[in-house]
Image: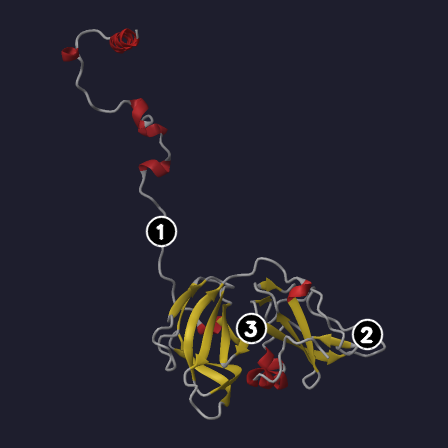
Amino acid sequence: MWRWGLAGLVAVALGCSSAGRTGSLDTLPLDDSPSADQTGGSADDLAPSQITASTVARPSIPDPCDVADLSMWTAQVASGSATIRIRNDGSTWCAVDVVESAALDPIAEQDLWLEPDDWADLVAGPRDDSCGEPSTVDSIEFDVNGETVVVTTALETCGWWITALYPVVGAQQPCAADALTGTWVEADRALVVGNVSWSSCDLAIVDDRGAAGSIVRLAAGDVAAWASTDVDPATCDEGPTLPFGQAVDISSVPPCTAFAGPGRPVVEVAPSLATAWADGSLDPFAPST
């Protein structure tokens, strides 16, 4: 029965396939050109992009960044290495290269591209640990796009060179209160704020962004400092005035203290802390005492 049923189905299928045709296979037209239905209609029915060449430009290599459009500062110091932050403050995508730097590890990345407001990290790592007594390096000199730049730092080392250059992943969220720690440095009358979390975050600056080099974003492990100004006790509030919105433990900051402008690198605002930071005798993330 199954054999008869299958043969019947085949016969029916063959009969249906030939239904409606006039003539034999030998008399059918041999025109292989596609029909209008197969091509999607005539040229009048096509979108301009379907009948003209593509107007999308191929990706190009960006021009070198104008060094004047780059902000550079020491963001971290640890274990004999300094992390120099490089930010593109210009309005265009551009390239940064350090290939002509004298102190460059041959296996380090030598260039990268930065969108506006993007950051990169340049790591100045130890080159020679064999000296008897490391010395304090208060500035690092290297080459950016053919120009010599000098960045203030605080580094205890026998010798350094550029060991890494890489882009920093941008922050996507404001800093949580438990991600920040504050340290009042009496010797410099400055507030130091550190990001003790494992991810980058943005400080919600209350006032304008300020001059180039201001710090509004902290990568994991970054610290920033705010210089203070005294306020007339007759006009000040009970507590200090902070330039950013997040809560930081500032119980040790004297009353009637105001912090001017955006955050700045620690080595510029709190030199006494920067020196201790470099030799490891003071942890900027330690709670205020």
- Mark 2 and mark 1: span between their CA atoms? 58 Å
Task: Answer yes or no: is residue 19 visible.
Answer: no
Residue position for label 2: 236
Q: Is residue 106 above or below residue 12?
A: below
- Residues 1 and 272: in front is 1
Which of the two discs, 2 and 1, labels the residue nearer the N terminus?
1
Tell me the residue that label 3 is attached to: 213
Label 3 environment density (alpha carbons within 10 Å; few <14, some 14–19, many ≥20) = many
Q: Position of residue 254 (x, y in %)?
A: 77, 79
- Residue at mark 1: 57
Q: Where in the figure is residue 274, as x and y percent of width and height?
A: 59, 83
- The amino acid at mark 3 is Gly
Q: Residue 168 placed where, x, y %?
A: 49, 65
Q: Quadrant of residue 43?
A: top left
The residue lying at 57 percent from left, 71 percent from top is 221
- In the image, is residue 71 above or below residue 275? above
Q: Nearer the viewer, residue 127 or 43?
A: 127
What residue occupies the far bottom of the structure in this picture?
132
Q: Which residue is drawn at the image coordinates 28% and 10% (left, top)?
A: 6
Residue 61's image quarter? bottom left
Residue 267 visible to an observer of this rendering:
yes
Mark 3 and mark 1 lie on one chain; the one further toward the N terminus is: 1
Cα–Cα gap, marks 3 and 2? 29 Å
Decide which of 246, 90 is in the foreground and name it. Answer: 246
Q: Residues within 10 Å of mark 1 (few under 14, many from 20)?
A: few
Where disc 1 sits, the SS reads loop
User: What residue lies at 63% left-to-right and 77% top-to-bottom?
Assistant: 284
Residue at left offset 75%, top offset 71%: 241
